[in-house]
Amino acid sequence: MEQSAGDGSSPSSSAAPPQKRLTVTQRDQIAAEGRVFGILQSLEDASFQTQESMLELWRDKHIEYLTRGLRQLGPNFHVLDANRPWLCYWILHSLALLGESVDSEMENNVVDFLSLCQDNEGGYGGGPGQLPHVASTYAAVNSLITLGTERALSSINRHKIHSFLLRMKDVSGAFRMHDGGEIDVRACYTAISVASCLNILDQKLVEDVGNYILSCQTYEGGIAGEPGSEAHGGYTFCGLASMVLIGEEDKLDLPTLIDWVVFRQGVECGFQGRTNKLVDGCYSFWQGGALAVAQRLLSFVDEQLKSSFLEGKKVAKGICSTSSSYPSEGDSDLDEHPGEFSNIGSYFLERESGCGSLFHSAALQQYVLLCCQVLEGGFRDKPGKPRDHYHSCYCLSGLSLCQYSWSKNVNGPALPKTVLGPYANLLEPVHPSTMLSWTSTTKSTSSSPNHEDNYS
C-alpha cells in the first residue's frame, strides 16, 4: 500500500502536471489570433473618427501599387516567370474593381505581350515561347476581356483555343493543365470558364466534367483537387462554379458543401482554406465566392433537404435535373453549334438571391480592411505577411462580394448599410462564377463576342 508523504500529501500530488506540447500549426494559430485580436482591440478602443479612418479603403495607394507593378517588376519576381499572364490578370482585375482603367499605351503593351504568349496551336503559355497551359490561358483571356477593347478581344484566337482545350480533355472527363500535366478541378474550372466566356463551350468539352467534379466532393462537403484528396476552398469554388457553368450544380451535395464552407470563417473573421488551417485573405474570395454562388442555388438545396428528410437517407445526386431551366442536349445539336452552353451563365445571373449573405459579410470586410490592407498599397495574406498582387486581387474580390452580398441581383446596387466603413469604399461588382469584374463582363458582351469578327 502506498505510503503518504510526511506532510500528509501523496507523492504524486506534488509532481508538476505534464506540459501540453503544441503542434507547429497550433502555435502559428495562436500567434495569428494574437495579431488579429490586437488590431481588433485597437479598433474597439479608438474614437469614432479614428475607426472611420481605420476602415477606409486606401484606393489611391492601391492604384499606385498596382499600376507600378504592371509597368515594371523587380528582379526578385523572376520566380514568377511562368506566371506572367497571371500577373497581368491579378493587376488588371484589381484595377477594374477599383474603377480604374489603364492608359492606351499600357493597354497596347499588355495586348502585345499576351499575343506573344499565345501558342500557334492554341492556348497561352506562362510567357513568350512557353508551352500552352490551361491556367495561363484563363489568366490571359480574362485579362483581355477586362481590357475589353476591340484590339484586345480580336487578339484572341477562339477556334485554336477550342482545339487546345479539346486536346487537354482527358478520358475521365476532366482536363489536363498542359501536355502531360496534372488533372484536377482547377484545370476543369479554368477550361470551362474560358470556353464559357468565349462562347465556345460545347458538348465535347462538357462531357463527363460534372461526373469528375462530383467524384472530388469529400465526406466533409467541400471539393478536393482530385478524388481522394482533402477538401479545399479554392477547389470548392472551382468545382461549384464549373458545375454552374455547365448546368449540373444540382448533382453536388449542396447542403453539406454550404455547411463546410460556412464553418471555414473563423474567430479572426476571415476564411481559412482547409480544416484546421490558418486564416488567409485570398479565401475571402475563394470561400466567399463559393457562398455567393450557393446563395442563388437555395431552391436546389431545399429540394435536396426535402428528399433527404422524406427518404431518410443521403440525398440522391442529380435530384433537381428534371426541373432545370437550362438547355438540354436534346434541344439542339451542340456539336455542330458550339456555344450552346453560353447562355447558362446568364440564366444563373438572372436568378434572384433566395436570402441574404450566407457568411458574416461585415466581419469579413473588417478582416480584409484591418488585417490585410497595407498602408503603402496592396493586400496581404494576414498580419505579419508581405503584400503581393495575388492577395491584392482576391482580397479586393472578396471585399466586393461582401458589399453586394445582400443585393437580390448579382449586378444590383449595393445597399449602403452593407458597405463597412465609408461608402466611398464601394468597389465594382465581381461576377461570382467567371471571376471577372461586372464592368468587364458588360464590355465583353457589348462587343458581341458571338460575332466571328470580334475574335479571330
Image: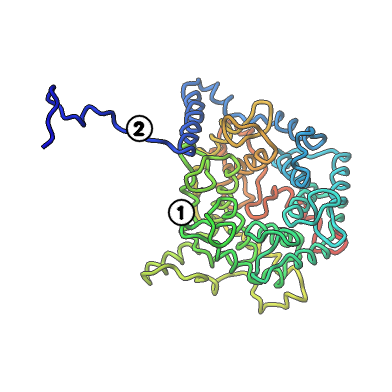
> Where on the picture, by quarter, is residue 347?
bottom right
77 vs 439, nearest the viewer: 77
Q: Mark 2 points at which residue?
A: 19
Query: Could you tell me how far apart the alpha carbons at marks 1 and 2 are, in whole angstroms?
Result: 35 Å
Callout count: 2
The spot of residue 143 in percent (x, y) is 77, 48
The crowding category of the residue bearing disc 1, from other C-alpha atoms within 10 Å (few below 14, some 14 to 19, many at least 20), is some
The spot of residue 351 in percent (x, y) is 58, 59
Q: Mark 1 points at which residue?
A: 259
The spot of residue 41 in percent (x, y) is 47, 25
Apparent side of residue 169 relative to residue 4 in the rendered image (left or right) = right
165 vs 453, nearest the viewer: 165
Q: What element carries label 2?
A: loop
| Residues marked 1 and 2 touching at CB (< 8 Å) | no
The crowding category of the residue bearing disc 2, from other C-alpha atoms within 10 Å (few below 14, some 14 to 19, many at least 20), is few
Is tag 1's residue or tag 2's residue first in the polypeptide sequence? 2
Residue type of the residue flagged with mark 2: Gln
> Where on the picture, by quarter, is residue 341?
bottom right
**Quadrant that contains the C terminus:** bottom right
**Quadrant that contains the N terminus:** top left
Residue type of the residue flagged with mark 1: Asp
> Where on the picture, by quarter, is residue 193?
bottom right
Closer to the eye: label 1 or 2: 2
Apparent side of residue 22 relative to residue 32 in the rendered image (left or right) = left
- In this view of the protein, can residue 190 be seen by the observer? yes
Return the mark for residue 440.
Answer: none
The spot of residue 371 in percent (x, y) is 56, 31
| Vertical placement of residue 216 versus 274, above or below | below
